[in-house]
Each structure stands twice: as C-alpha cells, then as structure tokens.
Image (tube, rainbow, N blue to C red):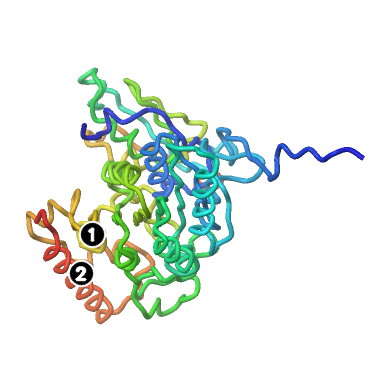
Amino acid sequence: MGTRDCRHICGESSPAVGEAGKTGEWRDSFPVIDPEKCLLVRQNKPSCFLCWLYCPDAVISKTIPIQINMEYCKGCGICAQICPAHAITMVREEGLCLDETG
Amino acid sequence: MKINAVNMTEKEYLLPGNRTCPGCALSLAYRHILKALEGQVIVTVPASCLTVLHGMYPVTSVTVPCVNTPFATTAASATGLVAGLKVLGKEGLTVLAIAGDGGTHDIGIQALSAAAERQTDFLYICYDNEGYMNTGNQRSGSTPLGAISGTTPILGKQQNQKDITAIMEAHGIPYVATANASYPLDLYEKVRKARTIRGTKFIHVFVPCSPGWGFPFSDTIKIGKLAVETGWVILYEVEDGVFRLTAASESIAKRGSLRPLREYLMEQGRFKNITEEQINELQGWVNTRWKRCLDRAVNN
C-alpha cells in the first residue's frame, strides 16, 4: 500500500487568459478609435490613458496608439463614454441574430 | 508621488476574458485593488460575484492566490490565514478579505465584527452592489428604500440600507474608508494606505451593477459619479479617529452643493416604482448624513 500524494491538499486552479472563453463574442457593438482625435496620438507622449484606466477587463494596452484586444473586449462602451476627446465611438456588430433587419 | 493614469503600473493581476458582465464596476475596482497591492496578497472570497470573476476550477482569471470560503466565514478565514503566515514567519504579504454586501452586511457580519474586535491584522473590503446580484438580485441589508429587487418585485424594498462603514468605525479599528469604482485613483490610494497600517482595516467600495440596477453597460462610471455628486455615496477616510473627506466629496464640500438625489434615482430602472414620499425620505437621509460628515471633516 503506497502513501497518498499529498503535495496538493486541495483543488488548485491555474491562472489563464480567457477563463470564460472568447468573451469578445458577447459584444453587440465594438469600439472604433479615431487616432486624429486621440490626445495620446496628437501629443505623442504618455498622457491621458483614461480608457486604459477605466477598462474593467484590462483589454486596452498602455501604448501609443492604444490597442484594444478584440478577442476579449466585451463591448461595454465605458471607454467611449470616458474619452475626453470623444475619439472612441461604438459601432454595432453586423450579422447578429439580434438585428431585426438581418 | 501622487498616482495618476500615466504613472500607474502596467502590470495586470486580473486577466482578460473573465466571467463578469460587460461594464462590471467590481471588475474595475478589483483590478485597481490588486494593482495597489502589487500581487503581494492572499485573497479570501466567499460566495459572491467575485467568485464568478475568479472562475471555475481548474482555471482562474486572477494571478494571485485565493481561498474560496463559505459565505459566513470571510473574516474567520482571513484570521486563519494571518495566523498561518505568522507561524510560517512570512512577512510582507497582505491578507485581503473581500466580500459583497450580502457577505458583509448580512451573512458575514458576525465573523467580521469578531475579527475587528480581536484587531486581527488584515484588510477587509466590502464591494457594495446593493443586492445579491449573481443569484438573481435578491434584496440585501444594503438595498435602498424603494428599489425593486428579486424578492421585492412590485413595490420595492420598504426599508433603507444600513451604514456598514459607521458600524465598522464603531469597532475602533485604525482605518476605515469608503471608495467608489468610478474614482479608481482614490480607491488605489486608500488601498495603498491601508496596506501599511497594522490592525483590521475596512474599505467600503461602491460598485454600480448594470444588470441589477437597470442602466446601460456604458453608464457604469456615470452612475458611480452621480452617486457621489448627489451625496448618495460620500468618499471619506477615518484614520485613527481623524475624519477626512476625499476626492470628489472633498471638492463638493468646498464648492458647497449636492445635486438633487432624484437625478441619481431616475437614471435607474430599479427605482421605477418609487413614490414621492420615498424620494423625500431618501433625500432627507442623504442630507442628514452629508451634514454630519461636513461637521466631522477636518479638511472642510
């Protein structure tokens, strides 16, 4: 009779991106950035970053220009609301079964 | 150095693709809480929306160690973690107990009160979305008067919420604060400060809930800011008995005018059946509390 493997005394999870799958599939609209309006691009130095700060899902990169990870962006639209230069607009996804015209 | 969006660390402890609803204020608040603690933390979480965020076995969307505990035992398990770390001689780790309003105002208050009385050295954060949101929006001890919930579906709740921060302050613990997910920098600084203090620390974080309260996902930040501007939420900290208003509440106190509470209530679907008397009662409650805070604040 052997001894039990006691290295793990309880169930352990490992961290991974996309725990709930590709959450980008939840979107009904997606953010589009207008670089000409974005303060970061216009000043070309680290400033503002409010969209990065307020993104609940941490899918916006802290770079110039910002990049949005569309695989996981849930399309909540907070970035579009918070942007002081109105550089982000939300555009409806096409081809969803929600579309009445579809 | 004062923290801002430019100098805040890029390192994320909350990974994309987690299970929270779009525009979740809890997800936003938790992201900044973990940033403030720089990953040097052991988290203990009861049944709540945060358990949903942490994910299903064997995958998790958070890169810090976390213990899942039964509903009533958040503070008790934190006490155990603190004792364990002490025996092992590990220093520099913060024990963070984080529970929802159900797990704090209602189910977890006994364990929390006992831990605060023992002055156990951990940080307790209550994130308050004013109901049991992940099980179907049942009313909790934090649901406001007149709000429609899963268990008060027609007339809305007939009682007002209890002031958990005042209850915790009455325990005489060294640090008590309120914060709001719509003011992440203020939240970040409060967590940073709480981390350096020994003893039981309590932070109440207001997190608007889009599906539960009935407003669009994109308005999460707007609703949170409106709550502060109308005085529904007052941002303050009490450090060793010294009361200070912070962030937007401090500037409102200096400028001297709250917006009518009606503006905040009318933005949300859960208040669609609220009566005029109830609005007046809530406004009176807000006015009394705001006056009390102004009288106490040292920086007013």
User: In percent of the image, x 37 and y 65: which residue is there?
Assistant: B269
Q: Which of B281/B94 is in front?
A: B94
Label 1 or label 2, whichever comes before in sequence order: 1
Proximity of marks 1 and 2: CB atoms separated by less than 8 Å: yes
Answer above or below: position of A71 versus B108.
Answer: above
> Is residue B149 toward the left or the right of residue A40 in the image?
right
Is B41 displayed left or right of B267 in the figure?
right
Residue B234 bears which disc, if any? Answer: 1
Quarter containing the N terminus of chain B? top left
What is the three-letter code of the residue carrying label 1? Ile
Which residue lies under the disc numbered 2? Answer: B289
Q: Is residue B205 visible?
A: no
Q: Secondary structure at mark 1?
A: loop
Q: Residues within 10 Å of mark 1 (few under 14, many from 20)?
A: many
Foreground pick, B6 / A20 = B6
Which chain is home to disc 1? B
In the image, is residue B266 above or below residue A14? below
User: For the residue marked with disc 2, what is the amino acid?
Assistant: Arg
Q: Can residue A60 be seen from the camera position used here?
A: yes
Q: Are marks 1 and 2 on the same chain?
A: yes
Classify mark 2: helix, strand or loop: helix
- At 40% from the left and 34% from the top, the residue drawn is B38
Farthest top residue?
A44
Q: Is residue B142 above or below residue B299?
A: below
Looking at the image, residue B123 sits to the left or right of residue A23; the answer is left
Q: Position of residue B130 (x, y in %)?
A: 40, 64
Q: Position of residue A81 (x, y in %)?
A: 30, 42
Percent x, y for residue B299? Answer: 10, 53
Q: Chain of mark 2?
A: B
